Image (tube, helix red, strand yellow):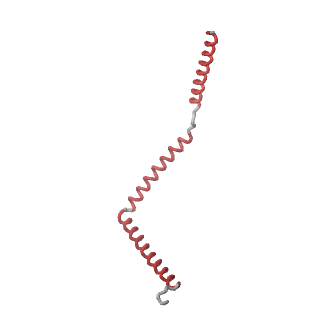
């Protein structure tokens, strides 16, 4: 029975493993942050963000203008009604011609 592992020992080993893992993750995060800080200057990052914000703002303005425009304007409706009336007149004329030919 001397080789059996007790629940308390398992718990202590788990806590030790969690502490080591947290330390490793913290050191890796610090290294990544340091490399990013040294690689990309803050001014360059901020300029890229400002450029992106200006582009998004310009696109937002264009989308708002497109949303304000009506889908079918009065002129387009008038054109559609004119074409429909022309087809209706053509159909009536064709019917009259067919009735008169008999």
> Residue lying farthest front?
1
The reply, left or right, for residue 26 in relation to residue 8 is left
Quadrant location of the C terminus? top right
The reply, left or right, for residue 22 in relation to residue 72 is left
Image point 59% across, 18% down: which residue? 90
Residue 54 at x, y percent in the picture? 45, 51
Residue 99 at x, y percent in the picture? 64, 12
The reply, left or right, for residue 28 in relation to residue 62 is left
Position of 62 relative to 43 (above/below): above
Q: How many marks?
A: 0
Residue 79 at x, y percent in the picture? 57, 26
Position of 52 relative to 83 (above/below): below
The image quadrant that residue 37 belongs to is bottom left
Image point 47% across, 50% down: which residue? 56
Image point 57% across, 33% down: which residue? 73
> Residue lying farthest bottom?
2
> Residue lying farthest left?
39
The image quadrant that residue 42 belongs to is bottom left
Position of 37 relative to 76 (above/below): below
Position of 7 relative to 75 (above/below): below
In the image shown, does 94 or 86 lie closer to the viewer?
A: 94
Residue 59 at x, y percent in the picture? 48, 46
């Amino acid at each position: 029975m001397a080789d059996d592992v007790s629940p308390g020992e398992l718990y202590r080993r788990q806590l030790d493993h969690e502490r080591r893992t947290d330390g490793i993750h913290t050191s890796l995060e610090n290294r990544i942050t340091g490399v990013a800080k040294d690689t990309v200057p803050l001014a360059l990052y901020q300029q890229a963000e400002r450029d992106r914000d200006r582009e998004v703002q310009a696109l937002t303005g264009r989308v708002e203008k497109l949303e304000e425009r009506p889908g079918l304007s009065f002129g387009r409706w008038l054109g559609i009604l004119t074409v429909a009336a022309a087809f209706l007149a053509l159909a009536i004329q064709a019917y009259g011609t067919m009735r008169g030919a008999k």
